[in-house]
Amino acid sequence: MLEPKKRFENEIILGGGKNDFEHDYTAILYSHAFRRLKHKTQVFFYAQNDHVCTRLDHSLYVSAISEVVCRNLQLKKINCDPMLARAIGIGHDLGHTPFGHAGEEYLDRLASGIGGFGHEIHSLRIVDKIENPRSHGSVIGLNLTLAVRDGIVNHCGEDRSTCLTPNKEPDLNGNSIPATVEGCVVRLVDKIAYLGRDLEDAVIAGLLKENDVPGEISAKIGSKNGEIVDFFVVDLINTSNGEQIALSQAASELMDKLMNFNYARVYRHEQLEPFKKRVEDVLNTLFKRFMTAIEEYDDRIDLYLSDSLKVVQVLGKFIGDRKRLYFDEEAKVHSVKEKRDTRIIVDFLATLTDNFVFQACSEYFLPEPII
């Protein structure tokens, strides 16, 4: 297991007996980025049903399930820390955009000239640079341990591998297996947590009926979220050992079949396609408006704050809190102003919730009457 990183010497450590991973968990829990997940899409855009899963719900499920798995692995004498798994789990999706993967795909296109966009890498960017900004001093971000940061950037929930051997060294580029047992647990639990819950939400949305799940799957793992989670969690605990975190071959095949079913009947459902086009339209509208504002105002925060649109004022506040990041650090990375401006806007758009995007577009197209 990775050792926690050395804290900055000038950092004030609060009392109360917290270890580093508890500190990380608390820092993420109280962050603005985590709070906003309650209004970000998991699968269904802008859901008005309070029982439909949000990105916040999913993060809490992954965190809780991962902790349970690690506690049981400890009983098998496997060296792991449940609090580390809990911290990685609660922070793994902080970088998700509004409107789920539809928003992520569109931001990836917008960011094609600056290296693209992926929510795993952006989650790391959130905790390292965007969250908890400081205009003075040497420390920005949440100052998390290397183990948590490695687990967050390498969680890759869409990867279908079900047998993971922790990487020998941490890799923060976002294309590796996590370097800890706990990170590997979160990576597998991520899939366990969303597959069954997405099925339930599809039933609530009327896209599926519970008995639509093929009998060859439901007969072995059930068709309700609780049954599906229990089946895979028990199998994960029983199969994993000190060398690998893994599902059994039989469970892996069932997970693959369930994922294929979800993609065919839920994630690519024809009723979701019109919403994806609308997502592109609203995000593109905001992108163009923000680019116009940045080209005109640049680093003059007072001009943003006096703009007639509230959303541009919010953009100005966002930039003003991170002037050192964007006008010092990013200016060196992106010497071309257009690329730096794109970086700012992509970062800002990724922070927005579904609700805020709709409010911004309403303000843009439907200004308040003056009388």
Image: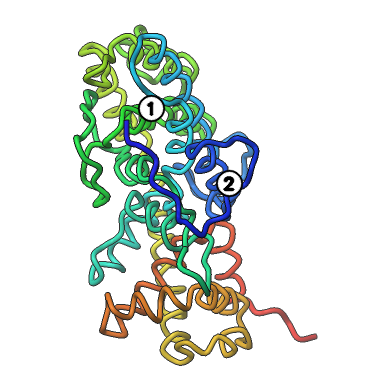
Residue 250: image location, x then y, percent: 23, 11
Q: Determine whether the residue tagged by mark 2 lies in a helix, strand or loop.
A: helix
Circles 2 and 1, Cβ within 8 Å, touching? The answer is: no
> The residue under label 1 is which amino acid type?
Val
Viewer can see residue 148: yes
Task: Identify which residue, 256 or 366, lies in the foreground.
Answer: 256
Residue 265 relative to residue 60: left or right: left
Residue 91: image location, x then y, percent: 46, 43
Task: Identify which residue, 41 or 187, lies in the foreground.
Answer: 187
Identify the residue shown where x is 32% and y is 35%: 2
Residue 16: image location, x then y, percent: 65, 37
- Of mark 2 and mark 1, the one earlier in the sequence is 2
Q: Quadrant of residue 344?
A: bottom left
Q: In which quarter of the image is residue 50?
A: top right
> The residue under label 2 is which amino acid type?
Lys
Q: Determine whether the residue tagged by mark 1 lies in a helix, strand or loop.
A: helix
Residue on which the image places disc 1:
189
Work out whether 110 lies above or below 64: below
Identify the residue shown where x is 41% and y is 46%: 272
Q: In which quarter of the image is residue 265?
A: top left
Identify the residue shown where x is 26% and y is 36%: 179
Q: Residues within 10 Å of mark 1 (few under 14, many from 20)?
A: many
Task: Identify which residue, 132 or 298, lies in the foreground.
Answer: 132
Task: Identify which residue, 247 or 16, lies in the foreground.
Answer: 16
Residue 239: image location, x then y, percent: 28, 11
Residue on which the image places disc 2:
38
Identify the residue shown where x is 43% and y is 45%: 93
Whole-angstrom CA distance, mark 2 to mark 1, is: 20 Å
